[in-house]
Image (spheres, rainbow, N blue to C red):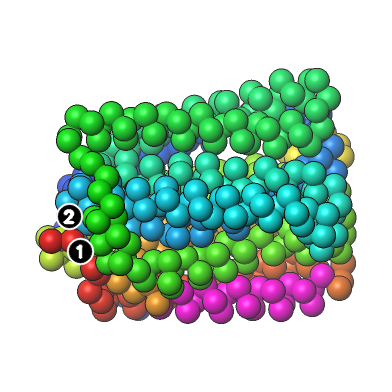
Amino acid sequence: MMSRFTSYLTSRTAFNGLSHRDSFVRNVFVLMTGTTIAMIVPVIASPLLTRLYTPHDFGIFALYVSIVSVISVPITGNYDSAVMLPKKDEDAINLIGVCLAVSLFAGAVLLLLSWVFAGEAGALLGNRHISRWLPLVPLTAFIMGLQQTLSYWANRKRQFKRLGTNRIIESVVTPALNLALGLRSWSVSGLIVGLLGGKVVAAALLGRSVWSEKRRSGLSLKRQVMFEQARRYGDFPLYSASTAVLDTAALQVPVLLLTRSFGPGVVGLFALTTRVIGAPLALVSQCIGQVYFQWIAEARHRNDEASYVFKIAGYLVLLVSGPVAAIVLFAPSLFSFIFGAQWRIAGEYAQILIFPLAVKFVVSPLGAIMPATGNIRLGSLWKMIYFLSTCVILYIASRFQTRTFLYVYCIHDSMLYVCYFFLVVRASASTRPVPVAR
């Protein structure tokens, strides 16, 4: 396997194919330009935010984001990721209609439940401060689902510059609202309203673009076509959506367990680490994954099975090695200097958390192979295992000290994502039929 890895890294032929076929590398860099700016703005704003908001505020906000993240995944029935697959735009635009209909229904049900059971949910989560914000969760999740759906359309149409610009706008609006409301002492509400405001603006801009394209192209939503597409891609809500929820929930388990066992102050320190380090890595990873998904989907339409898994993984390892070294060597001093002395511990957390974050950075974009090659069930199996093992192992670890918890989290996540990488390799070698509209 190592020889195969080396050959992919050094093969001039593979590089030429990767660079020119469908302009993969160019598209990645176009999207990464916007993504890089979108990363820099929140990081620049963070030193100001940490002086306006306390670790307790960040802890409650992190819990809110965790809940929204879990709910926003299935709110579209996971039909959003299928928007990339039909050959005809008519079918793809009707899949967007399916996503919108499913999201509206799910959001209405969740809104009712959040009003009725807000107090009980806060007690269950171990943080009663979150109860007053739970009715906003369905709205935020709906906007996030809509934004993700529209992003898939832009990705399908290779509008990577538009996606990059959209991320820049969101990255500016969100901290601007955070800072403005923080100066008015809005506490955690300033963080939540800032998040919602940024998502609304980003989704609205994408929606306006898609609506204009729809009118120019003469595309229309038809109930019969929507039902046909919903049936054709029925595996997505049946298998992909349910396990995607487990996958996202597994990512939020640390926040939930830290909240119950150690309080919002520790969660706030953990959240700053993931905000400053994890979020930028996740943005770049998502950007590469989006282009890779589009590239693989179109390659399959041409009966081209080349996936370049090892080559892309090698480039990602080289890309993340510098940040890993910097965090390991200097994180506590940097956090203390940039964010204030009370955040030095977050830098010590970063020295531990950078390793699983780096492994996810390398492996996550390659996971686009699973839906693109029809290996949804294989990916779903891993997500189920990941969720169950995360819940059990981290629940046991939460009985010990915070650092022990973080070390266990680091080892577990790194090992599971390495296993996922080998599943991706297997999926790239053996594909299953993906339902494609004729």
384 is within the stretch colored magenta? yes
For badge 1, the amino acid type reads Val
State which region is magenta.
Answer: 378-398
Residue 385 vs residue 25: left or right?
Answer: right
Return the x and y of residue 12 as percentages of the image width and height: 19, 57
For badge 2, the amino acid type reads Lys
Determine whether the residue tagged by mark 2 lies in a helix, strand or loop.
loop
Name the residue nearer the viewer: 324 or 292.
Answer: 292
**Residue at x 30% of width, y 67% of height:** 231
Which quarter of the figure has residue 423? bottom left
Quadrant holding the C terminus:
bottom left
Determine whether the residue tagged by mark 1 lies in a helix, strand or loop.
loop
**Residue at x 72% of width, y 77% of height:** 393
What mark, if any, has residue 436 been given in the picture?
1
Q: Which residue is mark 2?
A: 87
Seen in the picture, residue 380 relative to 22 is either above or below; the reply is: below
Return the x and y of residue 354 as percentages of the image width and height: 63, 55
Return the x and y of residue 436 as percentages of the image width and height: 20, 64
**Residue at x 54% of width, y 36% of height:** 199
Which is more N-terminal, label 1 or label 2?
2
> Is there CB contact under 8 Å for labels 2 and 1?
yes
Seen in the picture, residue 350 relative to 248 is either above or below; the reply is: above
Seen in the picture, residue 211 relative to 220 is either above or below; the reply is: above
